[in-house]
Amino acid sequence: MKLIELSSPSSVSRRPFKGLLGALLGAWVLFFWNGNPGGAEASGPFVPRDPVFPVSQLRSGMKGEAKTVVRGLEVTSFPVEIVDVLRREGLPRHLVLVRVSGALMDRTGGIAAGMSGSPVYVQNKLVGALGYGWEFSDHRLGLVTPAEDLAEVWNWPDRLPSFRPPVPLSGERSEEGQKGGGPGGALAECFPLTGGSFAFGGVPLTLGERSAFGPEAPLQTPLLADGMSPRAREHLGSSLGVRVLAGGGTPSDLFIDGRATLRPGDSVGVLLAWGDVTVGSTGTLSALDQQGRFVAFAHPMLNRGGVAYPLARSVVHGVVPSVEVPFKLGSPKSLIGIVTQDRPQGVGGYLGRFAPAVDFSVTARDSDTKREIKKRFHVVDDPFLLEEIVPEAILGLLDDAWARVGPGTIFSTLRIEGGGLSQEWKRENIFFSTKDPVAEVIKECRDLVKAFAINEFHEIRPLGVHLDVEFSLDPRVLFVEDVILSPQDAAPGQKVQVSVTLRPYRREPFEKVFTLTVPKDAEGTCDVLVRGGGIAESDQESLLQGWRSIKDLPSLLAELSAKESNNELVVELVSEGNKEEGSDKGTPGEEDQMLLSELQEKRRREGTLRTFRSNYYIEGLLRRPLRVVTPKGP
């Protein structure tokens, strides 16, 4: 959907927040997140606890069984027959064509989405795990990723971030998860994550073209999202390049269980976001080794390599038969580990270890209905995924909070806090649109989250982002209606009174008076410019021209804070007569080398810039000439 921005009567449009970020990012070296070890890493090749049946010894007609969960937590089995082995040039190196049968498959309609990763055994030895199937086909046929290929998930090193426990959404502890032995220590304390629901299921085993399988066919797993509006899911899918489907099921408490014990065939899920917004994918645990490592899914999730995603134990409510592809319905039961590898052959990670998270909260009030909602969710601590997931998660929450898409005004306060910040950073703004003000809020959130998440100076961990918005159907707009200067001729150093007439939407106008000072070096004709914040805003010329760079986090925050907001009235005197020597010769003058925050401070001190912050979205731009006269001598 195309979003329309309001233009001033002078056809000068507001600059989006990303204009500043584009200048900043253009001058920065991109920050690459390497992470730090989150504890002792396992070493050596992945050796499943179960004995392995080599793919080279498989023959057509061999019989075996597969294990999966079709209801609750109970692992059940069904017959499998080997049809053939497909040798490939890419990863995985082999895929095994199998046919499933039995009463269980008759009830489910065949191999269901959510069974990906289900281990397959021949002669009680692990052949591999179900990974792929076809839509609108015979769902009793599927493809198995062999155990040798699954083990190659661990051919790459982990990129584990330093551990910080995710902030619980509730302070109450759950009794569940405290039973049993095993590692975990303090990590085994279980905190319920209340207030959000998530359901796994409805995830096809394959994506891409509906054609016969070939070695070159792109195979990916869609994501399931809950707590997000349809357009938010659509945007997220487009951004990540995968299908994102709607979740279902009933709300459940999600708690941390550091002592969970699993076995091949258990239903598991990988989460990207959890809480009042949840995004993730479901599958089945394929194998475990003696070092506490696991492999699952038998295909990639997002194929992002070294990652740090939460692994959840999931409960299955049932399998829904479908002509397209059967699918499991389920929901997560507990957080039980961390996924550290997302590779073409599958996903892998550790049980009893947990991924750090970024905390988000949204408070939304409807000034017309007096209704208020508060939501909270966590997102994986991947700076390059934050900018993809968070804006769409917030979009989905705001869509549901307002329960409409249309004209209106939104008052917004965004607060960002975390380790590495000396104090909380805050931005207040007002957005008005005749089409979709929520979209305008999301644009700014996206740019700010990106600026903090991938800043090159300091890792901000733990990072917390809190958005407070108030909706109104009323067009809370102030229009710049008239500007009168007194006097209209002034000498350098003289003060000029600027009377600005402002008209609220369909209400009586009122007047605000400002005082500007003519620069001492001004000559000829100057312009007094009165405009809404963000309209014809000054560029970061020193960055764009390469005279300056952002060198530390405080400087970055200062430039972000210098960005004008839509509820500001800006009154400034623009003089062409104060160019410095050298600026006409291609060398920078003093102002040419200033960052925007420094230039604003200088102009406020000399009296050529004044601002007024209102409770309205200020629209319009008016320009008035001011003639600079030279005082006559005695």
Image (spheres, helix red, strand yellow):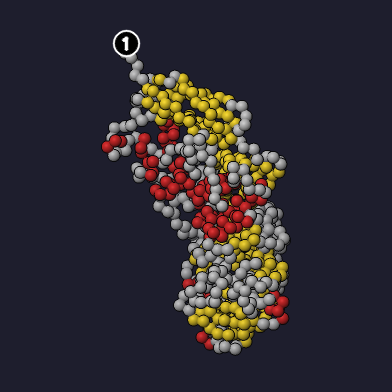
Taking 623 as reference, is 310 above or below it? below
Q: Position of residue 528 (x, y in %)?
A: 44, 28
Q: Residue at x 44, y 34 (%)?
A: 600
Q: Is residue 57 above or below residue 596?
A: below
Helix, strand, or loop for circle 1?
A: loop
Instruction: Name the spot of residue 77 as percent of width and height, x first.
Output: 68, 79
The residue beneath circle 1 is: 634
- Residue at the location (64% across, 61% down)? 246
Question: Can residue 601 be seen at all in this image of the molecule?
Answer: yes
What's under tag 1, amino acid-wise?
Pro
Q: Residue at x 51, y 48 (%)?
A: 447
User: Front-most of 207 and 263?
Assistant: 207
- Crowdedness of circle 1 by 10 Å Cα count: few (<14), some, many (20+)? few
Instruction: Using the image, determine if residue 504 lies above or below residue 98.
Output: above
**Which residue does the image show at 59% across and 62% down from the upper left?**
244
Residue pushed farthest top? Answer: 634
The image quadrant of residue 271 is bottom right
**Image check: 107 left or right of 380?**
right
Q: Nearer the viewer, residue 277 or 262?
A: 277
